[in-house]
Amino acid sequence: MTGYHAPRWNEPIITEMGSPGRRGLMFDGDSAADALVPAALLRKAKPCLPELSEPEVFRHYLHLAQMTLGMQGVSLFGTCTMKYNAPVSEAIAWRPDMAETHPAQPVETLQGTLGFIHGLDMMLRQLSGMDRFIFQPGGGADAAYTHAVVTRAFMEARGEGGRRDEIITSIQSHPCNPATAATAGFKVITLTLEENGYPSLDQLKSVVSDRTAALMIGNPDDMGIYNPEIREWVRIVHEAGGLCFYDHANFNGVMGKLSARELGFDACMYMLHKTFGAPKGGNGPSVGAYGCSAELAPFLPGPLVVQDADGFRFDDARPEAAGKIREYLGNVQQVMKAYAWVAAMGADGIHEASDLSVLANNYMDARLAKLRGLSRSHPHIEAPRMEMTRWSMEPLLRETGVGVLDVQARITDYGIDAFWLSHEPWIVPEPFTPEAGEMWSKEDIDRWIDALAAVIDEAYTDPDLVKSAPHNQAIHRLNGNDLNNPDRFATTMRRLRKTHGRMG
């Protein structure tokens, strides 16, 4: 293992830096600057902001970046499919003809932008079998919510809105499925896992009724288990009059291999920031691509981008539309990046990426199975998993007192990003869920597993070393007891100054 130690700067917060009068941009005079701003928008008093020169600001954030591990190491961020984001796409996103345009400007000036939105729509139709996609939702949860409100509008138009008030999901589906269904006013029925790793057909049949509005389900799930009975699930729900929504968050291992529509689903969603090479981070660049059948298309939130003989235009004259999920067209720059990724990969590249994703995961499984202190979810299921597997450190905790959160902190001392654990609820104790996808090399994967093996060995020989980690980071382990205490921890300088009476 190569040596690693994060840099440490004695860096104050930016609101405590600078000096009055320093500027990053200087105007000829106050009157010249004021003339650029409408009088109604001029401040009556100076804002409570730090005053710094441009080099000071740049150096400050450079120091913070150096102290942040981020994607500097190997990040097998399970259930989130971390992929490389090409700088060429970032460069295009910052071009004035993207960054400085507005969706309300004349449509003839937006033909290029509308062209790649429509282009990605057509690409995803090919992958899913659906008849229409929108990119308005701001992430996977937004896309799931889109289906909940489209379902509500569809049932109301059919005269069944008052009766069909139940949505079925499973304990292992992403939490956004039950959460968004409840937010849209539905009663949620959650199916439990059984011996084969997914709910049985009998369990599904026991809850389907004339009150069923929709099934919202992911497949494969975060344990890497694919439900081979999914066609029968869809048939049962359809016979009862409900809709079926495919949460394709884990599409990476099956992309190009199956079609949601071919399986019978009425709608599906993809996360562009997971499967299609757009950046992921803090729900800023997220996009949830929502696609549906022609039967549901009239209820989609608009505007839709359509193509006719004169080029591309907006279609927003749709009286049955469910209403907007997000403003305008959503995060268009990320749609462009996903379009570029799919166009560059092509059908053959997408097939190969899917194969590599499954291969990498099963290679990891074979190596992880040899490490002590670990167990695999549903260990009696010997079939290969898909692009990720849910593992457990419960044996390690039982034998050493070192838990998964301790290991997660310690592995960063080896220059490896803190790995992902599991969505709540933790039906697998002390979980972690590595996912290599197609972008990490065999050397990267081996380095990740070697670092994990080293930490596990430390847990057995010197557990206190792991429990007190990290040691090689810029900041050692924080005490999180006061993170929700506004008197001790503030998320903004305004709040901090208000708390301590320093709002001058």
Image: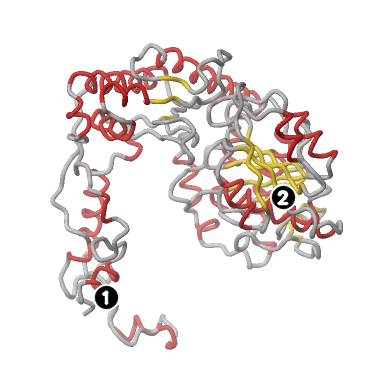
Q: Name which residue lies at 18% across and 40% down.
A: 7
Element type at mark 1: loop
Q: In this picture, is 265 found above or below 446?
A: below
Q: Name which residue lies at 29% across and 76% down.
A: 27
Residue under label 2, please give it. Answer: 166
- In the rendering, at what x and y percent does residue 376 appear? 46, 20
Q: Dot 2: few (<14), some (14–19), or many (≥20) neighbours within 10 Å?
A: many
Q: Name which residue lies at 34% across and 23% down.
A: 448
Mark sitting on residue 483: none
Amino acid of disc 2: Glu
Q: Is residue 432 left or right of residue 200?
A: left
Q: Name which residue lies at 53% across and 23% down.
A: 357
Amino acid of disc 1: Cys
- The coloring applied to the image is secondary structure
User: In 3D space, how far apart are the residues under numbered discs 1 and 2 (Cα atoms)?
Assistant: 50 Å
Nearest to the eye among marks 1 and 2: give it. 2
Q: Is residue 50 left or right of residue 180?
A: left
- In the rendering, at what x and y percent does residue 115 appear? 68, 50
Q: Nearer the viewer, residue 80 or 482?
A: 482
Quarter of the rendering containing residue 246? top right
Q: In this picture, is 378 found above or below 202?
A: above
Q: Nearer the viewer, residue 399 or 86?
A: 399
First in sequence: mark 1 vs mark 2: 1
Element type at mark 2: strand
- In the rendering, at what x and y percent does residue 377 appear? 49, 23
Q: How many marks?
A: 2
- In the rendering, at what x and y percent does residue 459 appear? 24, 23
> In this orientation, does residue 171 appear?
yes
Q: Nearer the viewer, residue 418 or 356?
A: 418
Q: Dot 1: few (<14), some (14–19), or many (≥20) neighbours within 10 Å?
A: few
Mark sitting on residue 48: 1
